[in-house]
Image (cartoon, grey):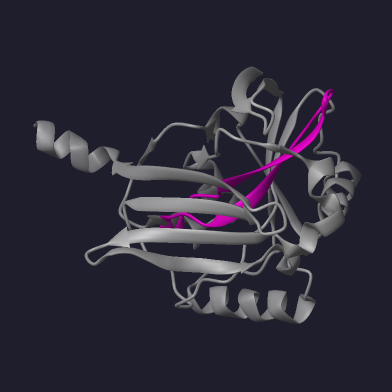
């Protein structure tokens, strides 16, 4: 267990103790689209999950607010997700990235989830402040390629299961901790339909009703590549 620091809309600091970290996969509300996504992944050599949705526990130390993450290999990519922080002081929402090793994912999704850090922003909103207009929120991910920043993902948060459904599902699967749980809850489709393995990702959780946005940007560093340069 360790503590992450966040900033609330009021300007107050929130210290959140992390006891469990969980990635919830295949959590789309539209099950036909989920099935289509599973078929797309099958073409990439990724086996279908044993159940839908799916709970993937990961080490709590993988959750990071650093501006750079270290990975091993060239085929890792991020995906924007809404992230719930559920603890004794209440439930909060922020934005994060279920950054994953796509090459390893073809062999084992649980191992792939565990192989890379999971970035989250430093700002949070109390869930109560957005729950009444939840489906109006937007998730956006930008990547920085040779031509600068471009949209990689963009969509309504309504494409993903409602937060109450996510929490209930995780609790039913016995993977929950009341002391402090970080839940990566699901993503929106990739604009191009295929993974991009860029080095710079920028994440947005946008609330159009309150005209505010949580943003987190991070850089991906290949540890093996850095080691080669030092040698």
Q: Residue at x 72, y 57 (%)?
A: 209
x and y percentages locating residue 208 in the rendered image: 67, 59
Quarter of the figure with residue 67:
top left
Q: Quadrant of the N terminus?
A: top right
Q: Is residue 101 magenta?
A: yes
| Nearer to us in this view, 194 or 57 | 194
Q: Residue at x 48, y 39 (%)?
A: 117
| Nearer to us in this view, 17 or 25 | 17
Q: Is residue 63 above or below residue 98?
A: above
x and y percentages locating residue 210 in the rendered image: 70, 51
Q: Residue at x 62, y 75 (%)?
A: 37
Magenta-drawn segment: 77-103
Left or right, 59 with respect to 180, comes to left
x and y percentages locating residue 142 in the rendered image: 43, 60
Left or right, 149 with respect to 152, comes to left
Quarter of the figure with residue 151:
bottom left
Quarter of the figure with residue 9:
top right
């Amino acid at each position: 267990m360790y503590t992450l620091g966040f900033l609330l809309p009021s300007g107050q600091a929130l210290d959140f103790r992390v006891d469990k970290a969980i990635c919830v996969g295949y959590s789309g509300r539209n099950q036909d689209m989920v099935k289509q996504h599973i078929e797309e992944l099958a073409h990439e050599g990724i086996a279908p999950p044993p159940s839908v949705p799916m709970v993937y526990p990961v080490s709590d130390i993988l959750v990071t607010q650093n501006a750079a993450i270290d990975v091993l290999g060239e085929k890792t990519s991020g995906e924007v997700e809404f992230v719930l922080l559920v603890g004794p002081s209440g439930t909060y929402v922020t934005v994060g990235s279920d950054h994953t090793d796509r090459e390893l994912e073809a062999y084992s999704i649980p191992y792939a989830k565990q192989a890379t850090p999971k970035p989250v922003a430093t700002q949070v909103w109390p869930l109560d402040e957005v729950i009444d207009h939840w489906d109006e929120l937007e998730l956006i991910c930008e990547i920085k390629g040779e031509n600068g920043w471009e949209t990689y993902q963009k969509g309504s948060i309504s494409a993903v299961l409602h937060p109450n459904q996510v929490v209930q599902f995780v609790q039913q699967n016995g993977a929950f901790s009341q002391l402090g749980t970080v839940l990566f809850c699901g993503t929106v489709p990739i604009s191009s339909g295929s993974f991009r393995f860029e080095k710079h990702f920028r994440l947005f959780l946008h609330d159009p009703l309150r005209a505010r946005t949580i943003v987190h940007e991070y850089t991906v560093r290949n540890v093996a590549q850095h080691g080669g340069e030092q040698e």
